[in-house]
Image (cartoon, rainbow, N blue to C red):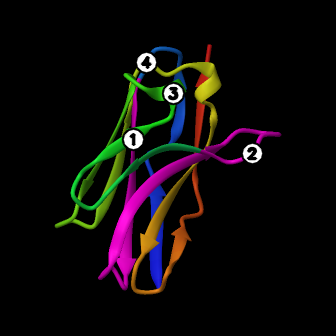
Amino acid sequence: QVMLVESGGGLVHTGESLRLSCAVSGSIFGINTMAWYRQAPGKQRELVAHITRDGSRNYADPVKGRFTISRDNAKNTLYLQMNSLKSEDTAVYYCNAESLLYKRNFWGRGTQVTVSS
């Protein structure tokens, strides 16, 4: 199995920054694309950004230019640098990993990000 543990969430004010981390452990061989999702109260979970093993990135329109996804394959860690945070970024942020070995995706338990105006 693959275990994902997010950290770095918290309460910040509008315009401030946070960096989320996702530590990957377990059967890390064969992990391909990794991603960050978020779910705000009363809304569906949505994709924030994803990154392939070779570093290709894609972002959802609401976060383009403000968020940066990165991964350190040597440290088995996924990151999300979030700048210029807005109140609408308030959500639980989840880490996701695609495992080619298990032919399924794994999820972390999430970390809360709250942006107060």
User: Which of pointers 4 and 2 indicates the residue nearer the eye?
Assistant: 2
Q: Could you tell me what secondary structure mostly forms the magenta stretch? A: strand
Q: Disc 4 marks which amino acid?
A: Ser
User: Which of pointers 2 and 3 indicates the residue nearer the eye?
Assistant: 3
Left or right placement of residue 4 versus residue 117 in this view: left
What residue is shown with label 3? Answer: 61
What residue is shown with label 4? Answer: 84
What residue is shown with label 2? Answer: 44
Q: Position of residue 92 (x, y in %)?
A: 63, 45
Mark 4 falls on what kind of element?
Answer: loop
Left or right placement of residue 92 versus residue 17 in this view: right
- Measure how far apart labels 4 and 1 are at the Cα level: 19 Å
User: Which of pointers 4 and 3 indicates the residue nearer the eye?
Assistant: 3
Mark 4–mark 3 contact, CB under 8 Å?
A: no
Dot 3 alpha-carbon crowd within 10 angstroms: few under 14, some 14 to 19, many 20 or more: few
Mark 2–mark 3 contact, CB under 8 Å?
A: no
Q: Disc 2 marks which amino acid?
A: Gln
Q: Position of residue 60 (x, y in %)?
A: 50, 34
Which residue occupies the foreground of this view, 88 or 52? 52
Which residues, given as a range, are shown in magenta? 17-46
Q: Position of residue 10 (x, y in %)?
A: 53, 38
- Measure how far apart labels 4 and 3 are at the Cα level: 15 Å
Check residue 73 in the rendering and tell me which mark sits there, or answer none. Answer: none
In terms of sequence position, does the residue under pointer 4 or pointer 3 come before the other? 3
Mark 4–mark 1 contact, CB under 8 Å?
A: no
User: Which of pointers 2 and 1 indicates the residue nearer the eye?
Assistant: 1
Which residue occupies the foreground of this view, 57 or 1? 57
- Measure how far apart labels 4 and 2 are at the Cα level: 23 Å
Relative to 100, is 60 above or below? above
What residue is shown with label 1? Answer: 58
Mark 1 falls on what kind of element?
Answer: strand
